[in-house]
Image: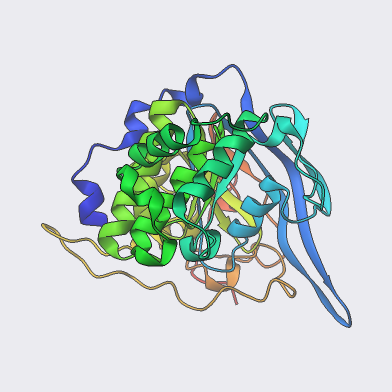
Amino acid sequence: MTGALEQETPVAARVPPGGGGKGPLLELDDIDVVYQRRGRPPVQAVLGASLTLGAGEIVGLVGESGCGKSTLGRAAMGLVPLSRGTVRYGGTPVEPLGRKARPQALRSLQMVFQDPYASLNPRRRVGSQIADAVALGRGDGLKSGEAGPAVAQALERVGLGPEVARRYPHEFSGGQCQRIAIARVLASGPRCLVADEPISALDASAQAQIANLLASVAADAGLGLLFISHDLSVVRKIAERTIVMYLGRIVETGATDSVWSAPSHPYTEALIRAIPKPGAGASLPVELPGDVPDPSRPPSGCRFHPRCPKAFDRCPKEEPEMYEVSPTWRSRCFLAEPGVARPMTGPAR
């Protein structure tokens, strides 16, 4: 996958910094998502997370499985209730989705799900499902004869022919189904996309194709794209900005080139070291020791300190703030705190 992505010019390089818009499309302000469980400790899935996403901007959200990134994406869509904080899209509050239809002002906020087979109806032809999205986006239904051309155009945008419209989802590969799912989303006329692990269920070649497809569509149409993935090597190629999560907390955020070349948080550094390097200077991945702790019983102090090779005596006792590395770069690590001595005594005991 990394090799396939290396062959193409990073789409992020073609996107103007900040997305080129006047203000953010999507705003998450200090949100918590806590799952209450009867007779058991609550699960702190997301704590104090804030982010913005502008028009034409591609932001990558990365972290290991269980870090809370998918929950954060679902919270942005109103698919899970917030315990605290606010989500706004175009200035409109994003309320938890209920039985009623979503307000028209929020319908251009769309999501691409991880499993394309689960997100498509197996009993309906592809064309009819895409036609539904066209009608949803227009808000006033489709006139006679409009569905066919609109469906064909949506399929063409993702590299598929109009004959696909007559077939059923089970007749396609995983990568083709994900293209169909993206075509359906694009047919609704979105301004902002949240893509939740959209490539993890695909083979390596399909992963590269879908990642580049989403990034190209976002860049060409000026869409805001929040791309959620556990694979930082993919995010490096398509995202202008990277946000790193660990155990419910955002631990680092900044320009992708900066975060990749000189990570400020030890967890980000560990994620990069875990990526195999092919070709000249090839190296095997360095596995991060241990597992993500139980989010219902997080460690004291810095949540990463039990696995951190750079932890010192302060780390188990205090939780670090988000310190400024540069005006557009933040890190939740005492090593990034200005004017503080930074001992490197090895893992805390």
The answer to whether residue 318 shows anywhere in this view is: no
Left or right: 207 with respect to 146? left
Check the image and name the residue furthest to the left. 280
Residue at 43% in and 34% down: 218
Check the image and name the residue furthest to the bottom. 39
Q: Relative to 139, does residue 208 appear above or below in the rendering?
A: below
Left or right: 193 with respect to 211? right
Count the marks.
0
Observer-nearest of 349 and 212: 212
Check the image and name the residue furthest to the top. 22
Observer-nearest of 337 and 288: 288
Where's the C terminus, which quadrant? Answer: bottom right
The picture places residue 156, in percent across and down from the top left corner, at 33, 38
The colour scheme of the drawn protein is rainbow
Check the image and name the residue furthest to the right. 39
Q: Relative to 228, does residue 283 appear above or below in the rendering?
A: below
Where's the N terminus, which quadrant? Answer: bottom left
Observer-nearest of 109 and 119: 119
In which image quadrant can residue 194 be found? top right
The picture places residue 210, in percent across and down from the top left corner, at 35, 50
The answer to whether residue 74 shows anywhere in this view is: yes
Observer-nearest of 34 and 112: 112
The picture places residue 338, in percent across and down from the top left corner, at 59, 39
